[in-house]
Amino acid sequence: MFAVPETVRDLAKLIARLGLGVIFFAHGWQKLFDLGIPKVTAGFRAMGVPLPGLSAWFATFVELVGGALLILGLFTPIVGLLLAIDMLGAYLTVHIGHGLFIDKGGAELVIALGVGALLLAAVGAGRYSLDHVLSRRARSSGRLARDGDGPVQRY
């Protein structure tokens, strides 16, 4: 079996974070600054999204802030999970039953974004991230146990 070098894996994680992060950030920016929350709420209401006002704020915040955090590689497991939940909600409330292709209202974009975010939540941000920098600092200061040193200490 061919083993992918760790540097290549970390570079792939960086590229995935940047690509997904930019897309999510742009969608959140569009909702907040181009359309505005009232228009997003109205659009969600017209599409039958439950709790359209709350859903509009949730989607906007998670996409804008979550996209920025993905780019930085900060809180990646939590952010990836929240973004995947956001895309699951979009799938279940808007795209389900419209096929795959986006030109017919299909789910290809939300599936790709959602599974990409979920994968990053599972594998982490990699070495080229703030998550990595902060975990190294925490380990070196003794706030986190090193691998194999027993349970993680939290202060």
Image: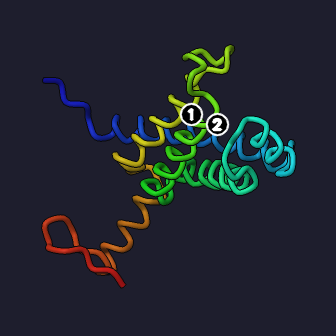
Disc 2 to disc 1, how far (Cα)?
A: 17 Å
Q: Position of residue 106 (x, y in %)?
A: 61, 20
Kind of residue indicated by mark 2: Ile
Q: How packed is label 2: few (under 14 Cα within 10 Å), some, or many (20 or more)?
A: some
Asked whether 12 or 63 is in front, the reply is 63
Q: Colour scheme of this structure image?
A: rainbow
Asked whether 114 or 139 is in front, the reply is 114
Q: How packed is label 1: few (under 14 Cα within 10 Å), some, or many (20 or more)?
A: many
**Vertical arrangement, residue 3 with respect to residue 120, above or below:** above
Residue under label 2? 23
Kind of residue indicated by mark 1: Tyr
Asked whether 122 or 129 is in front, the reply is 122
Which of marks 1 and 2 precedes in the sequence? 2
Total count of labels: 2
Could you tell me which quadrant the C terminus lies in? bottom left
- Seen at 50% across and 58% down, the residue is 74
Q: Is residue 148 left or right of residue 117?
A: left
Q: Position of residue 24 (x, y in %)?
A: 63, 41
Q: Secondary structure at mark 1?
A: helix
Q: Secondary structure at mark 2?
A: helix
Q: Quadrant of residue 110?
A: top right
> Dots 2 and 1: beta carbons under 8 Å?
no
Residue under label 1? 91
Q: Is residue 41 left or right of residue 62?
A: right
Circle 2 or circle 1, nearest the eye: 1
- Seen at 61% across and 28% down, the residue is 95
Could you tell me which quadrant the N terminus lies in? top left
- Seen at 41% across and 48% down, the residue is 121
Q: Position of residue 137 (x, y in %)?
A: 38, 71
